[in-house]
């Protein structure tokens, strides 16, 4: 019987669900799957892109672990595609490869002053507070007033972590270095800016509700943002999610002035114009234009310019994919060009045999886990049907890739190693009365996983 040797690059939800769907699919061939990731631990943005005080979302890890533990999938962590392992290498050992590398860079925001000292990308900040091994241990938390630009869930996560008292994060798996720096933060006010109105936000009702439940943090909304037009009223009447968001915001409007030590302000109809220099090359304020509804769900500028003093700015305007060596890439959209998961050549619509993609690097950084699964199903259906176009590897035996990595001195981690690291982190947390304490340094993660520590 024909056997498919498949490499999947990316061990986040997209890669893991792709492997699971293929193993469960009706097919006329055997399957052997190897999952590669540049990080020593699996789960991608679920481990390194979700705020630590979201245990419900972290529960996705339980389902992902069940897939990995079900058998039929080998995991090779701490292996960098394009450095430790190339596309030519994969062609020698596999019939095809699926790229599921996600989107982890911050999208650009083209406003003057965005490169001033004190201006940061939200993705970098999220990686820091989630203990990503490849970001610095420190973070400059010295601003009393902070701006967050964006109206999606990441913007709310960033705003909440900045405004929340560090001690309220202790029950989570927040790394020790992150706790210590957040504990010393002098922040008093966090301002969140969105250029459209309350009925056009991208965050979910759950995320919004959680903001109002943060201890000793007052939610501040402004009456001028709730002069709804007919389009707004139709959106509220016709969409349950918009209705719930509006109810939460309206309830906050009715609250009496608070007395908390920190405040989280939501500014709608606010289009950033400039990050203002304080005179020393650092952030001193954010200047924005007041917008207004255009009657069709969009906004127009009013010409009214306002300015709020801040000493730090975080842009949370979306994620963006990164190119992979030897793989076609769409620089404009930050994705691998593809047709339903089949990779297309840079020069046009010609399909590249053996190359597939799924997840955010396939369709851009939109959608939740449900979209990731449907993405993977679409990609896998083509992979199965393209049997005649698979590569013919010269060394398809499963031992060959192990020999290659070891010959290059790659200190790869495997599934057993992840279990070892997982148990170690849980033990660290248990000793401190917490659920988990993440190990942050890459070398330490690898040493624990490989039983070298």
Image (cartoon, grey):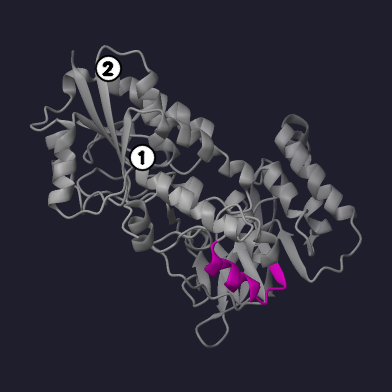
Q: Position of residue 193 (x, y in %)?
A: 65, 60
At a point 80% along the width and 46% down the height, the residue shown is 248
Lower sequence index among marks 2 and 1: 1
- Residue extending farthest to the bottom is 280
Magenta stretch: give its range. Answer: 175-190
Q: Is residue 183 magenta?
A: yes
On the question of residue 411 being in view, the answer is yes
Query: 72 left or right of 283?
Result: left
> Is 170 above or below relative to 33?
below
Q: Position of residue 64 (x, y in %)?
A: 47, 35
At a point 76% along the width and 66% down the height, the residue shown is 263
Identify the secondary structure beneath mark 1: loop
List the residue tagged with mark 1.
Answer: 100
Q: Position of residue 310 (x, y in %)?
A: 64, 75
At a point 26% along the width and 11% down the height, the residue shown is 28
Q: Position of residue 71 (x, y in %)?
A: 36, 28
At a point 80% along the width and 59% down the height, the residue shown is 222
Q: Quadrant of the N terminus?
A: top left
> Is 125 above or below relative to 423?
below
Identify the secondary structure beneath mark 2: helix
Q: Is residue 141 magenta?
A: no
List the residue tagged with mark 2.
Answer: 385
Q: Quadrant of residue 296?
A: top right
């Amino acid at each position: 019987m024909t056997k498919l040797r498949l490499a999947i690059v990316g061990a986040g939800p997209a890669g893991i669900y792709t492997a699971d769907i293929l193993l469960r699919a009706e097919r006329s061939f055997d399957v052997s799957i190897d999952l590669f990731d540049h990080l020593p631990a699996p789960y991608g943005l679920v481990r390194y892109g979700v705020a630590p005080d979201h245990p419900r979302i972290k529960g996705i890890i339980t389902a992902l672990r069940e897939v990995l533990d079900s058998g039929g999938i080998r995991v090779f962590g701490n292996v960098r595609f394009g450095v430790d392992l190339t596309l030519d290498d994969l062609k020698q050992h596999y019939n095809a490869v699926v790229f599921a590398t996600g989107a982890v860079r911050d999208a650009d925001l083209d406003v003057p002053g965005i490169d001033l000292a004190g201006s940061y990308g939200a993705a970098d900040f999220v990686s820091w507070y989630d203990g990503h091994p490849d970001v610095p241990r420190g973070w400059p938390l010295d601003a009393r007033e902070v701006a967050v630009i964006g109206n999606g869930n990441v913007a709310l996560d960033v705003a909440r972590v900045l405004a929340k008292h560090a001690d309220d994060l202790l029950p989570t798996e927040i790394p020790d270095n992150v706790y210590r720096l957040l504990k010393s933060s002098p922040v008093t006010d966090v301002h969140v800016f969105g250029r459209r109105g309350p009925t056009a936000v991208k965050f979910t009702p759950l995320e919004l509700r959680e903001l109002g439940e943060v201890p000793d943090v007052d939610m501040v909304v402004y009456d001028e943002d709730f002069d709804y037009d007919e389009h707004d009223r139709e959106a509220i009447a016709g969409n349950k999610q918009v209705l719930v968001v509006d109810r939460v915001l309206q309830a906050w409007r009715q609250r009496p002035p608070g007395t908390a030590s920190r405040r989280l302000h939501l500014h709608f109809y606010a289009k950033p114009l400039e990050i203002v220099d304080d005179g020393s090359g650092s952030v001193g304020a954010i200047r924005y234009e007041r917008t207004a509804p255009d009657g069709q769900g969009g906004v127009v500028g009013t010409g009214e310019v306002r300015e709020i003093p801040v000493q730090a700015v975080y842009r949370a305007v979306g994620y963006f994919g990164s190119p992979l060596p030897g793989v076609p890439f769409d620089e404009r959209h930050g994705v691998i060009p593809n047709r339903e998961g089949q990779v297309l050549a840079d020069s046009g619509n010609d399909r590249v045999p053996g190359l597939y993609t799924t997840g955010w690097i396939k369709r851009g950084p939109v959608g939740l886990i449900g979209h990731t699964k449907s993405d993977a199903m679409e990609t896998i259906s083509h992979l199965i049907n393209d049997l005649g176009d698979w590569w013919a590897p010269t060394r398809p035996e499963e031992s060959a890739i192990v020999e290659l990595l070891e010959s290059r001195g790659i200190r790869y981690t495997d599934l057993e190693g992840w279990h070892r690291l997982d148990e170690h982190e849980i033990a660290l947390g248990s000793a401190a009365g917490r659920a988990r304490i993440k190990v942050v340094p890459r070398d330490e993660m690898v040493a624990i996983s490989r039983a070298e520590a």
